Amino acid sequence: MITYRLNGKPFALQHGAPVRGLVPDLYFWKSAKWITGVRFVKLDEPGYWENRGYNNHADPWKEERYA
């Protein structure tokens, strides 16, 4: 999701204004604070945190923190 408000108020700059990415039900590093673009791809590729050892899916209920 791309969100633009929190609790009915617009985001402040330090919290990712004007919009922020949100991936529900996953650890928060999956939710981008500042969005610089959107890219649609056929295959999933590891990102910044996944290349540093974090789990690619990151389900907190399954304790999927590290790969």
Image: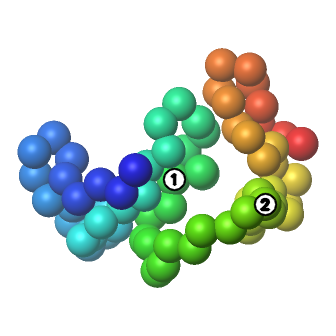
Q: Say if 58 sits above or below 2 in the image.
A: above
Is label 2 in a helix, a strand or a loop? Answer: loop
Q: How many marks?
A: 2
Task: From the image, tell me which residue sits under label 2.
Answer: 43
In the image, residue 18 lies at what x, y percent?
24, 71
Decide: is 10 above or below 67.
below
The reply, left or right, for residue 52 in relation to residue 4 is: right
Residue type indicated by callout 2: Leu
SS of the residue at dot 1? loop
Snapshot quadrant of residue 16: bottom left
For badge 1, the amino acid type reads Ser
In the rendered image, residue 29, in percent from the top left (x then y), is placed at: 60, 51
Q: Residue furthest front?
A: 42
Residue in the image at 46% along x and 80% along y? 36
Residue 31's tag is: 1
Circle 1 Cα neighbour tier, 10 Å, few/some/many (<14 / 14–19 / ≥20): some
